Amino acid sequence: MTTASPTAHGATPTTAEPVVRAEGVRKSFGRLEVLKGIDLTVEPGQVCCLLGPSGSGKSTFLRCINHLEKIDGGRLTVAGVPVGYRERGGRLYELREREVAEHRRSIGMVFQRFNLFPHLTALENVTEAPVRVARRQRAQVREEAMELLDRVGLADRAQHHPAQLSGGQQQRVAIARALAMKPRLMLFDEPTSALDPELVGDVLDVMRSLAEDGMTMVVVTHEIGFAREVADTAVFMDDGVVVEAGDPRDVLTRPQQERTRAFLSKVL
């Protein structure tokens, strides 16, 4: 399965190495096979939305992309590099945790829960990783962090702690924190599912602006309207397989598979 072209939000199609390439990816937890051979390609500057019922394997696949979960079969690369592994002589060898962390620096991830450090301000949450992990100069990082907080509409909340922020504001800080490491790829795992309905829009607006700026994104979401408007590829998963994938206008309005139609009839 390849992504749609041209891209929905205006990015220019490219022949560069795909940012994400999955080939026959499998993952099991004990006897439960969660991913049963996932094939997926995401090109630079594209947005891929993963849709499907709970338990279909979407979040597990997302976590496999940055090696938070180890795959049991197939091949999965980011920018041509197998995350978490070194390839030698046609075989893959797992890296040490420190080397895996180095690979992850190019991948930003935003979870359902915000996972902010409660004892740090919004600004400190954003500056922590660039200073401590990337060893960048604090003054420069602070300036860039303020720009990121401004971008997500929270410059005036820079000195607030997470407990002083709404759920939507905390999630926007989490997005700014991920962007502070200057990733080439952003992963979103149902970023609005823990939010009150009135707070969802602000988070989706930030994600739309990232898409418009050409950020490559893989998004697990139940926000069908967002997928229809922003995604280049909509991927419907169920029971660990890709049931249907393609242009969101086709998948969401003219699905070819009965399982896709049944799911959409319940959520639209």
Image (cartoon, rainbow, N blue to C red):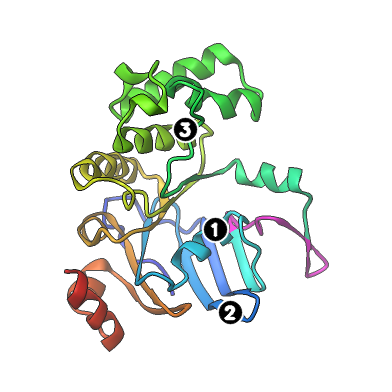
Relative horizontal placement of residue 215, taking residue 240 as reference (left or right):
left
Task: Name the one closer to the observer, 163 or 46.
Answer: 163
Label 3: few (<14), some (14–19) or many (≥20) C-alpha neighbours in 10 Å: many
**Element at label 1:** helix
SS assignment at label 3 = helix
Residue at the spot of label 3:
177
Mark with earlier residue (3, 2): 2
Amino acid type for the residue under numbered disc 2: Leu
Q: Could you give the CA–CA distance between mark 3 and mark 2, rounded to whole angstroms? A: 34 Å
Upstream in sequence: badge 1 or badge 3: 1
Circle 1 sits on which residue?
63
Residue 45, compared with residue 87, is above or below; it is above
Residue 31 at x, y percent in the picture: 63, 81
Q: Could you tell me residue 123's position as x and y percent? A: 45, 20
Q: Are marks 2 and 1 in contact (CB under 8 Å)?
A: no
Marks 3 and 2: CB-CB under 8 Å? no
The boundaries of the magenta stretch are 78-93
Q: Residue at x 35, y 35 (%)?
A: 172
Question: At 58% from the left edge and 79% from the top edge, which residue is drawn?
Answer: 32
Say which amino acid is labelled 1. Answer: Arg
Tell us which disc is closer to us: 3 or 2. 2
Q: Amino acid at mark 3?
A: Arg
Which residue is at the front of the view, 258 or 162? Answer: 162
Residue visible at 53% across and 15% down? Answer: 140
Name which of mark 2 and mark 1 comes first in the sequence. 2
| Residue labelled with disc 2 | 32
Task: Estimate the x, y position of residue 191 in percent, counting from the top left.
Answer: 36, 49
Residue pushed farthest right?
A: 89
Residue placed most toward the observer, 263 or 162: 162
